[in-house]
Amino acid sequence: MQKTTFKIAKMDCPSEEQIIRMKLDGITEIKNLVFDIPKRILTVVHSDGYEKIFTELNSLNFDTSVISTSPAKNIDFSDSYNSERKILWTVLAINLLFFVVEIVSGFISNSMGLVADSLDMLADGIVYGLALIAVGGTISLKKNIAKAAGIFQIILAVLGFMEVVRRFIGFEKVPDFLTMILVSIFALIANVICLYLLQKSKSKEAHMQASMIFTSNDIIINSSVIVAGLLVH
């Protein structure tokens, strides 16, 4: 394992950081990236040599130079990884709990909104499970897991929309608006807590960013189900 420090003279804002992250995304040898934007320094922990990394960085024309490279045998990311795992296990448990609560409540109250939201909770649980696999993995693994999570969400969205169309065309009993609203309020509180925990980590890794995006969407969904309950009323 090697630790190489690069001076990137034209890296002066988060936009350049994101460009660099995307540029280095396909290099499986990279284990960790540490950005110091005020000092315009990027530290990369990687296997093999740094030549491929330097070539990719240099192609961005950000005036990149190598400051130092040295063995990184004693670098330990366990504290950071353990913190990520703890947060992801917590939000995973919360989402699986509310998946059960919402799907049962949805069928009892005949609310497609609650059923759909429960499936979204399940999807998020799977996303957090995938994110747990990514903790400590390569950047490309984290990116691929974030992409897989997005595809899974799209599939669930299509299935949910098809069920909405089926119910719209057919004859369905009017949902119980009170159950819809109460359960969604509790789910909203749970998702706000999840988002707070994820944002508290301040992680910019792809798998954690994906988890934050899905949880933010859940808050919008919970609010929409509450509005739907009021419209049913």
Image (cartoon, rainbow, N blue to C red):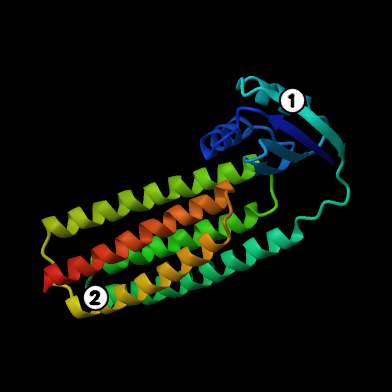
Looking at the image, residue 209 lies above or below residue 189:
above
User: Could you say whether the residue bearing mark 1 is in a helix, strand or loop?
Assistant: strand
* Disc 2 residue type (three-letter): Ile
Q: Which residue is mark 2?
A: 181
**Viewer-proximal residue, 103 or 137?**
137
Looking at the image, residue 209 lies above or below residue 53:
below
Looking at the image, residue 168 lies above or below residue 106:
above
**Viewer-proximal residue, 27 or 199?**
199
**Viewer-proximal residue, 19 or 103?**
19
- Left/right placement of residue 44 relative to residue 158 reads right
Mark 1 or 2 closer to N-term?
1
Q: Please provide percent x and percent y for residue 50.
A: 79, 29
Instruction: Report the residue at 55% width, 53% height from top.
Output: 208
* Other-residue count near label 2 (Cα within 10 Å), few / some / many at <14 / 14–19 / ≥20: many
Q: Which residue is mark 1?
A: 65
Instruction: Report the residue at 57% width, 49% height from top.
Output: 204
- Left/right placement of residue 127 relative to residue 215 reads right
Looking at the image, residue 101 lies above or below residue 32:
below
* Disc 1 residue type (three-letter): Ser
Q: Please provide percent x and percent y for residue 42.
A: 70, 37
Residue 29's tag is: none
